Amino acid sequence: MTSGSGFSRKYGQVLLVDPNIAKLEVRTLEPKPGDTIIEIGPGTGILTEHLLRTEARIIAVEPDHRFYESLQSKFNENVEDGSLILRKENFLEMEPEKASGIIGNVPYMISSEILFRLLKFQFSRCVLMLQKEFANRMIAKPGSGEYSRLSVTSRLRFNVRLVRTVPRTCFNPRPEVDSAIVFLTVRTDVDQYEVNEAQDLIRKLFSARRKMIRGIVDNCPEKFSQRRADSLSPDEIMELHRTLNH
């Protein structure tokens, strides 16, 4: 957020100012008339404006009272006709609900919290603007330097597609890093309760990612004993979890 406008940058939030990028995000989400779309942190409303043109019903969740008040004024007619519902609320504290889609330009410092808060909601698709490095870690493959606990957990919970990178020049104030747009859907072919149970194992593996797995876990199955933690795919880690807990 810009210091000149009086908004705090303490959460790593910067404002998208390129309307073409905003249009791309909305186009990627594909809202349809009658859909309910939750927008995370609309800020100045650059996404809101394009979302409203789709004739979807928009629930915009904005915790900052200054942005909230300016949005009330800017979109007064939409608020009055019910096409836009503004909530002065933090998405991380919002009561989970059902929506056709979720969209937002996410503050860098709470990206991980927002990503996993999404799992409390029922939605069919989601578009997020994230820090490029964070997005790359989400989609990283086994054996790569960026492959991490975040990669495993993200890919077990979501189908993730990197739409495009976004240069820092598209934001104000200009951040020190580039961003990326990602498209998410929740994986329905994985038992999410089981993924929750596997978190301790995932944490343990990646705290010693270059060690042989036989040196990390007790009673390591022969199949995995010569492997390093960062060489296992998310599905292999789940297989290891099942074997250890059989």
Image (spheres, grey):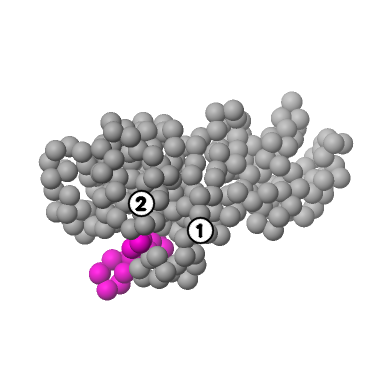
- What amino acid is labelled 2 in the image? Lys
Q: Is residue 216 magenta?
A: no
The reply to whether residue 120 is in sight is no
Q: Residue at x 25, y 38 (%)?
A: 55
Secondary structure found at label 1: strand
How far is the residue under mark 1 from the one under mark 2?
Answer: 15 Å
Whole-percent x, y for residue 18 in the image: 35, 61
Residue at label 1? 165
Whole-percent x, y for residue 114 in the image: 44, 47
* Among numbered discs 1 and 2, the one appearing first in the sequence: 2
Instruction: Specify the quadrant of the image occupied by residue 22.
Output: bottom left
CB atoms of marks 1 and 2 within 8 Å: no
> Does residue 88 sit above or below 101 in this rendering?
below
Whole-percent x, y for residue 119 in the image: 47, 37
Q: Which residues are magenta?
A: 1-18
Secondary structure found at label 2: helix
- What amino acid is labelled 1 in the image? Thr
Q: Residue at x 50, y 50 (%)?
A: 163
Residue at label 2? 23
